[in-house]
């Protein structure tokens, strides 16, 4: 059965924009043309692909399965264009980025925006696990997070490294030391994250090596809440070293047993490496990383 590119484009645009009118605007065609292509595509399946509502549409379970396949068609078209024009620049496009560490990666994103002013950056600040899922589902083009496991679909570029640290109030009795041990921490009120958070998993791994468990009556969503909780005396918090801005209300201290560095990566799907925007972001990240290494070697 032959599926036309017009059907695929109409279907993808409708799910991307949320309704037929915006899909028509995106593809510069009429709304009846969009609905006709969607109707033709749906006629090939035994069940509807879209649920219609007064304000838009939503994919059915079957539609979601199809979208996982059809969303790759745009990459195919772009890859062919790149092959015919290897020097093609990103130009006027939107690059979707999932970011788990703004302090580390915002300078990189800012430089990309300066270098490619016609390209719009849409940045989602989410957890490490959410970053990974968004990249794998093609909901974003680039992920900026520590990729802690190997995945055959993903490529990564090591960009920065840092260690797990404890965060205390400066007037805390332990804040006068140069470092802390897990044995000292286990008896203190702690501020933890949700189980799926990267920092929480790292913390549990460090404590687990000494058969210690981590527990607390205070669980926060992110680093900002953790910092505020620490500053108000709710306990000792935790963060990766470069994820905490200098703050006179906080003392950031090394944990003796947390010796392993966590690598922050630029992550992308392997089969999308050559696409404009993705290719240029990776190249810029590589330039910045090499530049940082050369600065260190000159010290």
Image: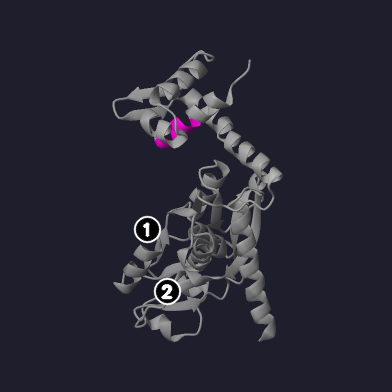
The crowd level at tag 1 (other Cα within 10 Å; few <14, some 14-19, many 20+) is some
Left or right of 131 in this view: 50: left
Instruction: Provide the secondary structure element on which disc 1 rests.
Output: strand
Q: Which residue does the image show at 64% across and 74% down from the upper left? A: 291
- Does residue 95 appear in the picture of this structure? yes
User: Considering only vertical position in the picture, is 15 above or below 258?
Assistant: above
Q: Nearer the viewer, residue 51 or 242?
A: 51
Left or right of 62 in this view: 276: right
Q: CA distance from mark 1 to mark 2?
A: 21 Å
Q: Which mark is residue 245?
A: 2
Query: Who comes first in sequence, dot 1 or dot 2?
Result: 1
Count of numbered tags:
2
User: Residue 66: percent from the left, percent from the top?
Assistant: 54, 27
Instruction: Provide the secondary structure element on which disc 2 rests.
Output: loop
User: Residue 232: percent from the left, percent from the top?
Assistant: 29, 72
Q: Which mark is residue 219?
A: 1
| Colour scheme | one colour
Q: Quadrant of residue 299?
A: bottom right
Q: Is residue 14 magenta?
A: yes
- Magenta-drawn segment: 12-17
């Amino acid at each position: 059965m032959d599926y036309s590119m017009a059907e695929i484009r109409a279907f993808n645009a409708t799910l991307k924009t949320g309704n037929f009118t915006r899909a028509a605007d995106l593809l510069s065609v009429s709304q009846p043309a969009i609905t006709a292509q969607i109707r033709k595509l749906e006629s090939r399946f035994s069940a509807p692909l879209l649920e219609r509502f007064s304000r838009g549409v939503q994919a059915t379970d079957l539609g979601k399965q199809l979208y996982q396949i059809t969303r790759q068609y745009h990459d195919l078209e772009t890859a062919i264009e790149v092959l015919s024009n290897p020097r093609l620049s990103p130009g006027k496009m939107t690059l979707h980025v999932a970011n788990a560490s703004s302090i580390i990666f915002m300078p990189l994103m800012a430089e990309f925006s300066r270098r490619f002013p016609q390209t719009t950056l849409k940045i989602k600040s989410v957890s490490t696990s959410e970053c990974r899922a968004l990249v794998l589902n093609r909901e974003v083009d680039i992920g900026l997070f520590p990729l802690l496991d190997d995945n055959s679909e993903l490529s990564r570029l090591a960009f920065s490294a840092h260690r797990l640290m404890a965060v205390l109030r400066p007037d805390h009795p332990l804040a006068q030391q140069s470092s802390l041990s897990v044995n000292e921490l286990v008896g203190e009120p702690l501020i933890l994250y949700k189980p799926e958070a990267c920092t929480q998993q790292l913390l549990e791994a460090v404590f687990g090596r000494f058969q210690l468990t981590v527990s607390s009556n205070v669980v926060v969503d992110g680093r900002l809440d953790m910092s505020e909780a620490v500053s108000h005396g709710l306990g000792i918090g935790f963060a990766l070293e470069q994820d905490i801005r200098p703050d006179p209300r906080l003392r950031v201290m090394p944990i003796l047993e947390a010796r392993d560095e966590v690598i922050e990566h630029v992550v992308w799907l392997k089969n999308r490496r050559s696409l404009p925007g993705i290719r240029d972001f990776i190249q810029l990240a590589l330039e910045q990383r090499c530049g940082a290494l050369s600065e260190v070697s000159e010290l």
